[in-house]
Amino acid sequence: MLNGKKVNQWSFWLSPAVDKINWIKAGFDKGEFFFVENKEKELVGMFRLMQQDELYWGEQEAKARYIHSLVVEKKFSGKQIGNKIIKLVEQEIINQGIFKLRLDCNAGNPILCSYYENQGFVKVGEKQMVDSLNNLFEKELLPDFPLRNLIGQWKGSGRGKFPSIASFNYEEELRFEFIPEKERLFYYQKAVFIDTQELVHLETGFITKIKENEFELNNAQSGGRNEILRLQILQKKDDFLKLLLTQLDIENDKKGLIKTEREIIVQGDKLNYIHKMHTNNEPMQTHLETSLFRQ
């Protein structure tokens, strides 16, 4: 099939050298190879996904993932399987808070290079290997989504206080997942007491775009309360994001809560937030202060 297309870039795999075999073995040892099945449990393709690729890319500071060995079974050729696999990989790494997907392609295979360019990859360099000159391609994921810096899983700790309660320390897990069909975020937050691991608070919901730089967070909370907050982007640049959430509506509150306000600051892999409350008996003041780190 490849010979018929005059593509011979993988011919060395007919009798691979020891370094090629070791390269494959290292990928299996690290759990980097993935096999793709359809609904009928048929094997349709395979790929390798790497956290680092120093062989082709050298040392890199920016967090990225690297695709290698993307192949599709011949019987499924022409069914856009490769495109679907790439989309699945993109969605997976986006929700890990990683927004660069990279790969290399033999410069002597213009058809395959064009294929990746049509998938949104951009040539950013070249790498001369022993057997070939390879083009280095990169795809920036969600470059225009204003809340991109939030996406991922965060863990850390915080401290709670309020005049009507005893101060307490807690551990927290916070997760934002991107939903591509609606360009919204699924949101999950859970806090437990550090000493006992007893549940302090849990809430979950969605963040939906209302207009430019303005979103709404609706959440359901473990105590039965439901809340809708306006989310405004106060500042955004590179890896810095500052948000202000103010309450629009509240239902099923049993503790005299009048209004809440949250300030979130994301800088790189660190997220800080302050949660303020106004109750029947107390004016608006800080209730929670938390520092979290991307996992």
Image (tube, rainbow, N blue to C red):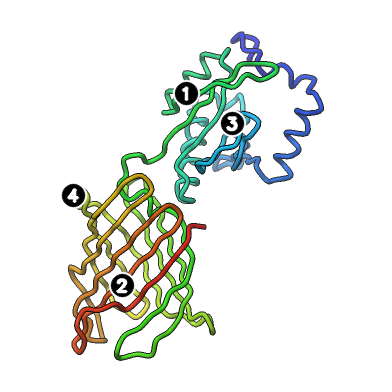
Q: CA distance from mark 2 to mark 4?
A: 24 Å
Callout 4: helix, strand or loop? strand
61 up-or-down from 262: above or below:
above
Task: State which tag comes first along the sequence, 1 or 2.
Answer: 1
Residue in front for this viewpoint, 195 or 24: 195
Q: CA distance from mark 3 to mark 2?
A: 42 Å
Callout 3: helix, strand or loop? helix
Q: Indicate the position of residue 287 as horizontal and vertical percent values.
A: 32, 79
Callout 2: helix, strand or loop? strand
> At 49% from the left edge and 46% from the top edge, which residue is drawn?
92
Q: Mark 2 — residue?
A: 275
Callout 1: helix, strand or loop? strand
Q: Give the left or right position of residue 226, taking residue 82 as reference.
A: left
Q: Mark 1 — residue?
A: 123
Residue in front for this viewpoint, 277 or 211: 277
Q: Mark 4 — residue?
A: 211
Amino acid type, label 2 = His
The tag on residue 155 is none
Nearest to viewer (mark 2 / mark 4): 2
Q: Indicate the position of residue 277 as horizontal and vertical percent values.
A: 25, 78
> At 43% from the left edge and 84% from the top edge, which residue is drawn?
168
Q: Are marks 4 and 1 in contact (CB under 8 Å)?
A: no
Q: CA distance from mark 1 to mark 3?
A: 13 Å
Q: Mark 3 — residue?
A: 57
Q: CA distance from mark 1 to mark 2?
A: 44 Å
Amino acid type, label 1 = Lys
Q: Give the left or right position of residue 30, taking residue 50 as reference.
A: right
